[in-house]
Image (cartoon, helix red, strand yellow):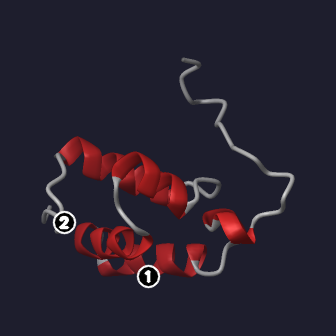
Amino acid sequence: MKKPDKELSDQAVDRVIEMAWEDRTPFEAIEAQMGLKEEEVIRLMRRCMKPSSFKMWRQRVQGRATKHREKRGKEVKRFKSSRQKRA
């Protein structure tokens, strides 16, 4: 697996990929938690995934309202998965 521009551990890269695949995790949350802007996440995904998987991911998230905070409805404040730790 190639490293992104910013030095991230393999575990951090795995977490970014997981967050990027989650429908309800906006790019702004990835930036806040991991320090990567949307363009950097896209670059990381392109480098770390097979071309077919990257293409499928891009089609999935492109224009998806839940991946961009400003496109979400005002009633959505924060999403926390039921699988997430309760700390």
Q: Is residue 45 above or below residue 81?
A: below
Rendering coords of residue 38 (x, y %)? 43, 71
Q: Is residue 70 above or below residue 35?
A: below
Q: How many badges with numbers are in the image?
A: 2
Q: Is residue 51 left or right of residue 70?
A: left
Which residue: 32% across, 81% down? 51
Q: Is residue 44 left or right of residue 33?
A: left
Q: Quadrant of the C terminus?
A: top right
Residue at the extreme right of the image, as rendered: 75
Quadrant in which residue 44 is drawn: bottom left
Rendering coords of residue 55 (x, y %)? 44, 82
| Number of the front mark, 1 or 2 | 2
What amino acid does circle 1 point to? Lys
Q: Quadrant of the N terminus?
A: bottom left
Rendering coords of residue 84 (x, y %)? 56, 29
What amino acid does circle 2 point to? Pro
Disc 1 or 2, which lies upstream in sequence?
2
**Residue on which the image places disc 1:** 55
Which residue: 27% across, 52% down? 13
Q: Is residue 24 left or right of residue 31?
A: right
Q: Is residue 84 left or right of residue 30?
A: right
Check disc 1 and report its element: helix, strand or loop: helix
Which residue: 58% across, 80% down? 62
Residue 6's disc number: none
Instruction: Rate crowding at label 2 as few (under 14), some (14 to 19) or many (20 or more) other CA atoms within 10 Å.
Output: some
Quadrant in which residue 70 is drawn: bottom right
**Residue on which the image places disc 2:** 4
